[in-house]
Amino acid sequence: MAELIIKNLHVNVEGVEILKGVDLTIKAGEVHAIMGPNGTGKSTLSYALMGHPSYLVTEGEVFFGGENVLALAPDKRSHLGLFLAFQYPVAVPGVSVANFLRMALNAHRKAHDPADKGISIPDFRKLLRSKMEMLQMDPAFAGRYLNDGFSGGEKKRVEVLQMATLEPKFIILDETDSGLDIDALKIVSDGVNAVQDSKQGVLLITHYQRILNYIHPDYVHIMLGGRIVESGGPELALRLEEEGYEWVREKLAA
Ligand code: ADP
Ligand code: MG
């Protein structure tokens, strides 16, 4: 099954060790949250998992569904079913949301079957319409240029639409909540919950507890200084909200 296993992961960014041995196993269907203060290595973990060239893995292993993830180029990782929703999505002027999604979907289909000619335009329109209905999105959205002049909330909704269309096996959300007002947060969370089925694993990276009111994690991990230093259930997130990170630091220093 599509289980993500991270073993003793060390990652350097510009010659500095940021991740110092991360261990984490996420089974299919489980939702795990990683919480931690800014600068602690949360985004570094998500970029390293997706194979960003600036994030150099110096030690450790990552397996997904039994495949050695670190041996694969970023596009192959995506074809394997790993999906990363970025903290800061990029704009692509000149490419519409619909075209972008169709190209992404076709690339995935071709990766699984080299003979695949791609989804027909009418079939794709039907698919996109049903996904946009599910996510309560205005159909006009599909014709706009990708992320060009989109509000924070709109960018996040495109990412959720992308997830709904590609149906990845594993979803990494890196601070999907940052910069969202409460209405946008609820829309995005509803979207993720609608997209997530019982087989998908989710790694939800967040600085704040509030998104966990909408997307309920099975496990919560605390990252400090490039390591996971505490793991527990949802109660851990509530404790962080009430008490901050000081007790974790004190426990580590003891
Ligand atoms: P978080 O997501 O937990 O806020 P990051 O993983 O973004 O933390 O950053 C961890 C550390 O790595 C920070 O000290 C940050 O300055 C550094 N870092 C991250 N990405 C880069 C980069 N592309 N270039 C230089 N330093 C980086
Ligand atoms: Mg970050």
Image (spheres, rainbow, N blue to C red):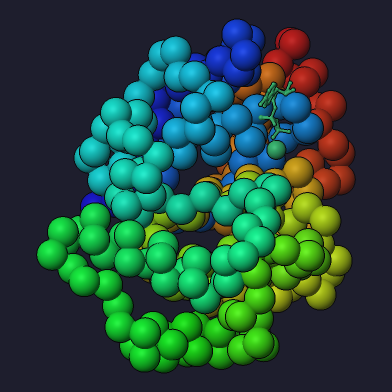
Q: Quadrant of the C terminus?
A: top right
Is residue 254 shown above or below 76? Answer: above
Answer with the quarter of the image where residue 47 lies: top right
Q: Nearer the viewer, residue 35 or 95?
A: 95
Q: How many numbered badges does the structure rendering display?
A: 0
Is residue 69 shown above or below 219? Answer: above
Task: Please state if 58 lies on the left or on the right of 116 as rendered.
Answer: right
Answer with the quarter of the image where residue 124 lies: bottom left
Q: Residue at x 63, y 58 (%)?
A: 92
Q: Residue at the front extreme?
A: 94
Q: Which residue is drawn at 65% across and 27% down?
A: 41
Q: Which residue is drawn at 54% across and 24% down?
A: 55
Q: What percent of the width, then of the height, locates residue 190?
A: 63, 75
Is residue 227 shown above or below 72? Answer: above
Q: What percent of the width, then of the height, locates residue 100?
A: 50, 66
User: Can you see residue 205?
Assistant: yes
Answer with the quarter of the image where residue 161 lies: bottom right
Q: Which residue is drawn at 76% across and 66% down?
A: 150
Q: What percent of the width, then of the height, locates residue 64?
A: 31, 42
Is residue 244 shown above or below 18? Answer: below
Classify the position of ligand 1 by quadrant: top left, top right, bottom left or bottom right: top right
User: Can you see residue 214?
Assistant: no
Q: Which of 248 and 183 is in front in this view?
A: 183
